Amino acid sequence: MTGIDPAPLFTPFRLGGVTLANRFIMPGMQRSWCEDGAPLPILGEYYRRRVEGGVAMVITESCAVDHPTATNVPQFARINPATLPAWKDCVAEVKSAGGYMLIQLWHEGALRKEDAGTGAEAHASTLSPSGLAFPGKENGRAASLAEIDDLRAAFIRSALLAQEAGADGVEIHACHGYLLDQFLWPGTNRRDDAYGGPIENRARLHAEIIAGVRAACGPGFVISIRYSQWKEADYEAKIAATPDELETMLTLWREAGADIFHASTRRFWEPEWPDRDETLNLAGWSKKVGGLPVITVGSIGFDIDVMSSLLEDREAESNVERGMRELLRRFNADEFDLIAIGRGQIADPEWVNKVRASRFGDVRAFLRSDLGTFDGEGTSLIEDAHKAGQRVDQGADQRADQDAGRDAGDA
């Protein structure tokens, strides 16, 4: 007997136009099982097995929007008219098992490698707010206002394609140092127009995208937005320096039409502003000030975060029971509504069902080898920097290790 009752996490939850059977979702975690951006059948089968294993909703790996500058790596997912039939098949796999699905819309921004890959995308310009991959690293150029209009339209157009594919909604990727996060982070956004400066300007494009998706796709279509303080290039970075800035940002997005906030953290048990609250993490603060449901995530059941799993020559110690005890404490304190489990479900498709039955000791432990071809072919700017032993400068007191550059998520 464990003394843990997981039943509260297996209650239904209404999100937009769908009702989830429980509080567990699968977040975006890259597998690179795509060909020219189209998901291969193995990806749909992989998602279906997790739904059969108990998860209520799947969020796809980051999927490049229908814009030539979004990515130039053929193994990374893309959504456009050419890949739409494959996405229909992928969504159908999830629906066949009774699950729901969001397609995560993403753009690499200045983390895109120029003149890499093949096809028309290979030689497109690399666009970002200010031509910075991270402080001190120039790559590509700043997008003009007309190009920002085009980027916004690409996210909205891609949401319509996701809806046509049968997805229940989309998640707007604005985390971990990629394009929309580059707008949020003062370290990569040096603009002096309506999209730079104070947080309400840095969060403006995201609000415009959300409002556009809501207008195009209707009231029942789920819109999640995923954001993070940390970057793959700087673990100590912050897009919101204070809870007040967080509230300003989230209020803009809520009023634009978002349904749920996905607060990405590396370790869910760490407080965001310990001088203000000794336990409340980013998800808890988002629930407190944002006025919408919240997804929590970050090394649930593990002792190290996903970036450490990728980069360090050691395995994560798995203790699902201990993680569930702390998770339930926070859930009962109303700090979040849904839980994203990444590495746990990569390792064990029955993770959720085993937790439901309190069979914590039967959960298969995650191994680094489970990631397989995680990064596809080639390396990112951040991975190159890591291998060269470079560091990010963001003032005299802020330095952070460079990390593996394909979006790993945080689970």
Image (spheres, rainbow, N blue to C red):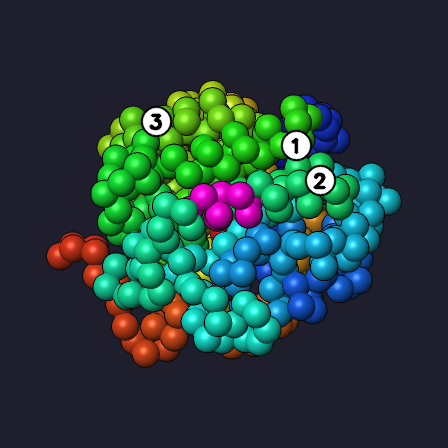
Residue drawn at (86%, 44%) of the image: 96
Q: Residue furthest front?
A: 146
- What kind of residue is marked 3? Thr
Q: Which residues are magenta?
A: 148-155
The residue labelled by disc 1 is: 217
**Amino acid identity at mark 1:** Cys
Is residue 125 shown left or right of residue 168?
left
Q: Residue at x 23, y 43 (%)?
A: 192
Question: Alpha-carbon distance for marks 2 and 3?
Answer: 29 Å
Drawn side of residue 271 relative to residue 35, left or right: left
Whether label 3 touches label 1, CB < 8 Å: no
Image quarter of residue 41: bottom right
Residue 405: where, in percent of width, then height? 45, 65
Q: Position of residue 131 (x, y in %)?
A: 31, 59
307 falls in the magenta region: no
Residue 158, x across and y down, in percent = 62, 46
**Callout 3 secondary element:** helix
Label 3 to label 1: alpha-carbon separation: 25 Å
Which of the labelled discs sits on residue 248, or is there none? 3
